[in-house]
Image (cartoon, rainbow, N blue to C red):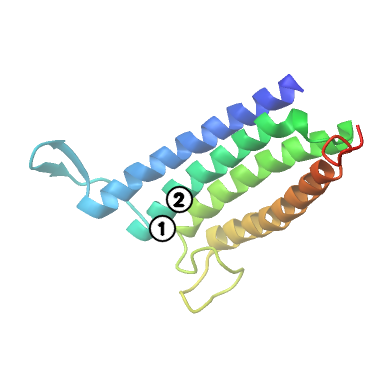
Amino acid sequence: MERYQKLMIGNAFLVIMISMLAGFMLGFGLIGGLEIFPGKIIEMPYYGSADGWARAHAGGLTNGLLIIGVALALPLIPLSEKMRKFNVYGFIFIGWANTVFYWFGNAAASRALSFGDNPLGATNILGAIGFGLAFIGALLIVWLLTHAALAVLRDKQIMGSE
């Protein structure tokens, strides 16, 4: 159990670190670069939009915290060993899939919200990959959270029959 928790927390910290890098991209987009001393801004390479980087910054942090929360709750969720392992690797996948979605979404006019072009703009290979990973992650998280919630709520210890 502890090994799974450490694996989840380590991956969560990396997802959060990547979200902090998105914060730099947000800053570059808002002020046009990096201020090296008061009033002196050097231009930095940048793609995407400030809004997209704000979402990547906040979304990555949220995904990392979700993984940490699940890791800490793992001992309290009555799952078989096989299902526990699936949850661990599933949540790790979800965190990384969403990270890729946010970063690739900034590189596609479609914002990685569809496989093809959409009202926001044309897609590209990065948009299609980002959407595909996020779509799988979205389906997976709904299933994993529902399964875990029902397992906890059905647990005999909380139903009053100890």
Residue 5: % across, % down: 69, 26
Badge 1 marks a residue whose secondary structure is: helix
Please tell me how crowded label 2 is: few (under 14), some (14-19), or many (20+) other residues with Cα within 10 Å. many
* Circle number at residue 52: 1
Residue 127: % across, % down: 54, 62
Residue at x 14% of width, y 43% of height: 41
Instruction: Tell me the amino acid under the disc marked 1.
Output: Gly
Residue 57: % across, % down: 42, 47
Q: Residue furthest left?
A: 39
Badge 2 marks a residue whose secondary structure is: helix
Residue, disc 2: 56
Q: Residue furthest front?
A: 160
Residue at x 59% of width, y 62% of height: 128
Front residue of this view, candidates 23 and 117: 23
Q: Do we see residue 75 in this rendering?
A: yes
Residue at x 80% of width, y 41% of height: 152
Residue 79: % across, % down: 85, 36
Left or right: where does residue 83 sit relative to residue 12?
A: right
Instruction: Identify the image quadrant of residue 70.
Output: top right
| On-image quarter of the N terminus | top right
**Residue 72 against residue 155 in the figure, above or below:** above
Front residue of this view, candidates 32 and 147: 147
Q: Residue furthest bottom?
A: 119
Residue at x 34% of width, y 47% of height: 25
**Residue 103 against residue 61 in the figure, above or below:** below
Please tell me how crowded label 1 is: few (under 14), some (14-19), or many (20+) other residues with Cα within 10 Å. many
Left or right: where does residue 122 sit relative to residue 75?
A: left
Contact flag, marks 2 and 1 (Cβ < 8 Å) = yes
